[in-house]
Image: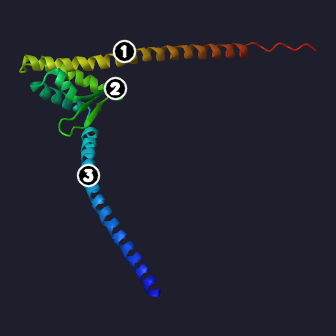
């Protein structure tokens, strides 16, 4: 009976060892595959972040203009816009996102960058050296961005007017209160009847 118990314990140990080794092999292979995928994904993300954060003012608009101009050389506006414009959010901080042709990352353009790009594209469409189809494509991109920015610029003007009006009203109320306080302190206190 002892022999049977020893065998059973020895078989249980061997099974545990085999299970642990199998799990280590499986986890090791899986972890190795994940690390190479993670490295590629991290590299793409790192490159995309580096490209967008290291741009000096105006440079991002120039890169956008170059991408659009190059794409319009061989594509219509309908095809080029589907390939380059990732999304139109219409917000101040992210008016739209344009796909980087090299890394395929989406680069968000804020209102100022979109206005710069719009101006560059209108000028580029009028520049000599482009075919009629290319100039038309570039002009359609500029018009598209103009429709996005016009609403935001108009909303900014209205907000500024509201802010100025509110400030003027608050200033007038403060002046009125100050005047009332000064009048109240100038009048002598009436003697109280005894």
Which secondary structure, mark 1?
Answer: helix
Q: Between 76 and 69, which is closer to the camera in this rendering?
A: 76
Find disc 2 in the rendering and name its residue.
89
Which of pointers 2 and 3 lies earlier in the amino acid sequence? Answer: 3
Real-space CA distance between mark 2 and mark 1, rounded to the nearest whole angstrom? 17 Å
Find disc 3 in the rendering and name its residue.
37
- Look at the image and tell me whether residue 123 can be seen: no
Find disc 1 in the rendering and name its residue.
154
Q: Between 105 and 130, which is closer to the camera in this rendering?
A: 105
Q: Position of residue 114 (x, y in %)?
A: 27, 25
Is mark 3 in CB contact (under 8 Å) with mark 1? no
Callout in the foreground (3, 1): 3
Task: Tell me the residue at 32%/62% (across/down).
Answer: 27
Real-space CA distance between mark 2 and mark 3, rounded to the nearest whole angstrom? 31 Å
Task: Tell me the residue at 25%/19% (across/down).
Answer: 144
Is mark 2 in CB contact (under 8 Å) with mark 1? no
Residue 105 location, quadrant: top left
Q: Is residue 54 above or below residue 129?
A: below
């Amino acid at each position: 009976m002892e022999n049977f118990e020893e065998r059973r314990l020895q078989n249980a140990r061997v099974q545990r060892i085999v299970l642990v080794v199998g799990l280590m092999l499986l986890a090791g292979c899986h972890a190795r595959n994940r690390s190479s995928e993670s490295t590629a994904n991290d590299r793409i993300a790192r490159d995309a972040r580096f490209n967008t954060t290291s741009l000096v003012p105006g440079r991002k608009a120039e890169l956008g203009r170059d991408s659009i101009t190059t794409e319009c050389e061989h594509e219509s506006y309908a095809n080029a816009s589907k390939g380059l414009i990732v999304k139109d959010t219409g917000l101040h901080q992210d008016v739209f996102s344009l796909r980087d042709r090299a890394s395929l990352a989406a680069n968000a353009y804020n209102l100022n960058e979109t206005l710069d790009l719009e101006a560059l594209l209108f000028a580029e469409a009028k520049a000599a050296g482009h075919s009629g189809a290319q100039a038309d494509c570039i002009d359609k991109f500029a018009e598209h961005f103009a429709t996005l920015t016009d609403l935001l610029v108009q909303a900014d003007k209205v907000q500024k007017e509201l802010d100025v009006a509110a400030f003027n009203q608050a200033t007038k109320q403060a002046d009125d209160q100050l005047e009332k306080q000064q009048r109240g302190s100038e009048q002598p206190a009436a003697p109280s009847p005894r």
